[in-house]
Image: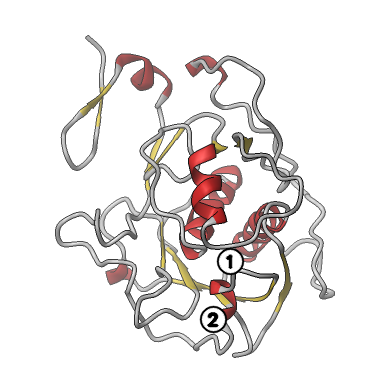
Amino acid sequence: MESFHHPREGKSLPPGRAKGAARLITLVMVSGLAAWPGELPGGWSGDHSPCDRHQEVLKREHMNLGVRFSTADAGLAADFARAMDFWAAILDMEWHEEDSRDCSIQIVDGEPGLFPSAEVARAQFPGRPAFQGWIAFNPKKDLPRSERYLVAVHELGHLLGLAHNPSARSVMYYLCLEGAVLLDAADLAALAAHHRLRAGRPDKALIVAASGRPSGPDPRPHTESARYGLTYNPEPAIKTTTDRAPDR
C-alpha cells in the first residue's frame, strides 16, 4: 500500500494524502506545548534590530502595523507583502513599510543555527519574553514564490497568536503539502479570540488565494487532484502606505 512518511515521526499519511503530497516542506512548530524534542520554541531570539512597537501585534482592537523588511531577498519581501494583504482583509488592521526601529513586525534572514533540517521559517510566539515581532526565513531554502507566500501567511498566523491546526487542509497545518489550503472555522475562531475580525467576515473556511485576498468558502468537493488550485499572479498589486517599488 502506498504511503507518505512523516519526516520525523516515521508515521504514514493515508494513501489518499500520500498520492497528492509529492512536495513537502516542514514548517516550524512554535507552540511550546507541541514542540519537537531538541527544537527551539517560539521564544527564540537573535542579533537583530528590535521592533519598538511590537506590542501593536498583540492588540485586540484596530492594529496599525509597521513592517520592516530586513532581508537581502527582494522577492521574499514582495511575497510577504501579499501575505500581509491577506491578513489585512480578514483582521481589523492596516500595515505599512517601516524601515526603522518603529516597526511592529520584522522579516529577517535567519542565522544557520536557528533552523533544524528542512525547516524554512520560524516565527516568534507572542507572549514570550524575547518577543519582538520577528519572523526569520531560512536563506538556504529556495522555494517557488507561490509556496513562499503560503509560508509567509502561515508564519504571520503564528505571530498573530495561532497555533498549528491538526487539519491538513488548514494553512496552519505544520506541514505544507501540495494543494489549495484554507483558513478554516477553527482558525477563524482562534483568531477572533485574539483580534477583532473585519465586519462581515464569515465564520466558515476561506481559501488562502495567492492573490493576497481570501476567498471562499470553497464550494468544490475536496479531492487530492484539486488540491493545487492556487492562481498565481507573478506581478501582484501591492498596496501599502509607502512608495515602495512594485518589484519588491
Which quarter shows the C terminus? bottom right
Is 40 on the left-hand or right-hand side of 189?
A: left
Q: Mark 2 — residue?
A: 55
Give the vertical position of 242 relative to 199 (above or below).
below
Q: Amino acid type of disc 2? A: Gln
Which quarter shows the N terminus? top left
Residue at 37%, 21% in the rendered image = 17
Give the vertical position of 179 relative to 222 (above or below).
below
Quick check: can you spot residue 216? yes
Is there CB contact under 8 Å for labels 2 and 1? no
Q: Position of residue 6 (x, y in %)?
A: 24, 35
Q: Where is residue 238 in the image (x, y as percent from the top left)?
A: 79, 59
Question: Which quadrant of the figure has residue 95?
Answer: bottom right
Colour scheme in use: secondary structure
Viewer-nearest residue: 232 or 102: 102
Q: Where is residue 94 in the image (x, y as percent from the top left)?
A: 74, 67
Q: Mark 1 — residue?
A: 73
Q: Amino acid type of disc 1? A: Asp
Residue at 56%, 90% in the rendered image = 52
Please, what secondary structure does the residue beneath circle 2 have? helix
Is 44 on the left-hand or right-hand side of 102?
A: left
What is the CA distance from the residue labelled 2 to the residue labelled 1?
26 Å
Return the disc, 2 or 1, that comes first in the chain's sequence.
2
Nearer the camera: disc 2 or disc 1: 2
Give the vertical position of 91 relative to 243 (above or below).
above
Viewer-nearest residue: 137 or 196: 196
Give the vertical position of 166 relative to 241 (above or below).
above
Residue at 59%, 61% in the rendered image = 76
Quick check: can you spot residue 70? no
Number of callouts in the render? Answer: 2
